[in-house]
Image (cartoon, helix red, strand yellow):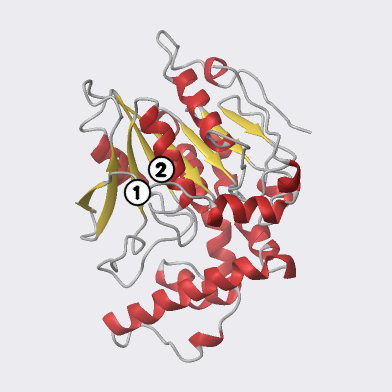
Amino acid sequence: MPRHAYSPPLLLRNAHLNTIVGGRLRRVPPPAYTRERIDTPDSDFLDLDWAYAEDSHHRAQHAVIIGHGLEGNSDKPYIRGMVRALTGAGYDVVAWNFRGCSGEPNRHVHFYHSGSTDDVETVLSHVRTRYDHAALVGFSLGGNKVLKYLGEQGHESLADGGVTFSVPCDLTTSSDVIERRENRIYLKRFMRSLREKVAEKATLFPGYLDTKGLENIASIREFDDRYTAPLHGFRDALDYWDKASCKHVLEDIRRPALLINAQDDSFLSPSCTPDTDNSWLEIDTPRYGGHIGFVTRRGLYYTERRTLEFLARIWSPGRDAEDPAAACPTRLLNT
């Protein structure tokens, strides 16, 4: 399959328009999901939304697991679009809802965070009981989880590879960037959803969470300092961001992986696109794309084309699984 450079419609060379059109305004029919609830080792649950290859006469041999972004779910337009592209190409797909993101609160007072890869392993282990081959796709926060998991597991990874887009590989600097005035419209939406989640948890777990002044929390740092870090065993927001960032383990990835971060992504700092010599990791930096935008004039979005191209390479018959060059032959730096 040919490689695709990204060239957006002229109007969508504006990063914010690309982000909003791709993430909010795109209309994709809902997939025919089948929901499955699985238990986690710590007695919680995860809701998986399955969609199956369009050619139902032949059982798919490959499954793709998709992870969404901050406060996302399997119903987001970018997830729906990816599901449609993958099932159309003959893959079975599971759109994985992070803890507390499936429309029902999870069982514990804590929920999910950017660096929690134990759930990645749980989902992969479950999927691999049915399929010989599985790959990961992650957007934004979900992309950080994918790359962190691949780095932590190295050659022991249960995934054959991973494709990621708009990834905050350095959570410390990206958290500063998202606080900028230009991102206020996105930040308000994230914070409203996060505050609602904490308020709901406080009702379910009386006495565990201090909600005094919750309605006034307007920054990621304040929220993570007060809730995310202590709930998940970190000292504070800075400790959480540092330990949860995938940048520390990118050199340890030993499965084919692809990272695509647009140069004009207003959520990401320069350090979110790392400089690494790891031949297992292909890094592309299109000039345009926004944050999980990558809108195209017609047909599949750029994210979907690149994912199909990548999967075709790593799952090509006869490919040497121990040869990174076979799956990541070159680096394509779009300028």
Quarter the N terminus occupies: top right
The residue at 72%/42% (across/down) is: 288
Q: Are marks 1 and 2 in contact (CB under 8 Å)?
A: yes
Residue holding disc 1: 96
Q: Secondary structure at mark 1?
A: strand
* Left or right of 292 in this view: 335: right
Q: Quadrant of residue 241?
A: bottom right
Depth check: 70 or 4 in front?
Answer: 4
* Left or right of 97 in this view: 36: left
Determine the CA span between mark 1 and mark 2: 6 Å
Kind of residue sitting beneath label 1: Trp
The residue at 52%/55% (across/down) is: 244
The residue at 63%/37% (across/down) is: 297
Quarter the C terminus occupies: top right
For residue 170, above or below residue 304: below
Residue 237 disc label: none
Q: Horizontal and vertical percent for residue 276?
A: 66, 34
Q: Horizontal and vertical percent for residue 328?
A: 58, 22
Depth check: 267 or 239 in front?
Answer: 267
Q: Horizontal and vertical percent for residue 71?
A: 46, 62
Kind of residue sitting beneath label 2: Ile
Near mark 2 (Cα within 10 A), the count class, few <14, some 14-19 or many ≥20, is many
Sequence-wise, the earlier of marks 1 and 2 is: 2
Q: Secondary structure at mark 2?
A: strand
* Left or right of 38 in this view: 267: right
Residue holding disc 2: 66
Total numbered labels placed on residues in the image:
2
